[in-house]
Image (tube, rainbow, N blue to C red):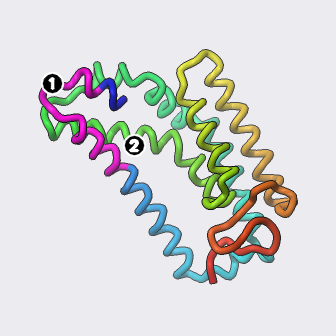
Amino acid sequence: MTLMFARVSRTSPTWVFVAGYLAAWTAYGLLAYGVFRLVIALGSDWLAWDRNGPYVAGGAILAAGLYQLSPLKEACLRHCRGPFHFVVHGWREGRRGALHMGVEHGLYCIGCCWGLMVALFALGVMSLFWTAVLTAVIFAEKLSFPSASSLSRGVALTLVALGIWVAAAPGSVPGLTDPGGSARRRCRWVPE
């Protein structure tokens, strides 16, 4: 999308579009961090791994899998796969228009990826294995090839199964980590 914007735009520098895109992702990150801090402020004992941690993590991953099947995910993914339609029908002139377009495109991308980001958080943001797997999934989903929709459904089923696996037997899930501990068993979701 950035390359397409750069080719088409004659009045606005590309960095303005990119700034809007990054502003959308920054707002999403701040919102996610705010929710995290709220959970910490309310008390995180219920998230202790030996209590409800595996169920909360498994539920988050399962929810991400179900979101993969939603019409909203499909609409956002369709936008990200084919930005030409957005450029033709959503073009706005000037710097303000470029900023608005960047924010709007960023929101579509967030709509595509937020569920996978939640799954990454539940699997462990410091896990290189799961980061690589989910990066590959996001990349493959955004490619515009005929079997991309079936890929999204396959990812959904995989995430649902993975969510159940994490809830039922977290110690056997490869690379499962959490922000406050090391890999696998007896770890906590939230730092003490």
Q: Residue furthest front?
A: 128
Q: Secondary structure at mark 2?
A: helix
Q: Residue 145 in the image: x percent, y percent?
A: 58, 18
Apparent side of residue 111 relative to residue 53 in the rendered image (left or right): left
Q: Which secondary structure, mark 1?
A: loop
Q: Which residues are magenta?
A: 5-24
Amino acid type at circle 1 is Arg
Q: Is residue 94 above or below residue 164?
A: above
Q: Residue at x 67, y 57 (%)?
A: 127
Residue at screen point 81% across, 52% down: 164
Q: Which mark is residue 77?
A: none
Principal SS element in the magenta part?
helix
Q: For residue 103, what is the image quadrant?
A: top left
Provide the residue designation for mark 2: 107
* Quarter of the image where one finds residue 175: bottom right
Q: What number is the disc on residue 10?
A: 1
The quadrant of the picture occupied by the C terminus is bottom right
Q: Quadrant of residue 143?
A: top right
Amino acid marked by disc 2: Leu
Does residue 16 belong to the magenta stretch? yes
Label 1 – label 2 distance at C-alpha = 24 Å
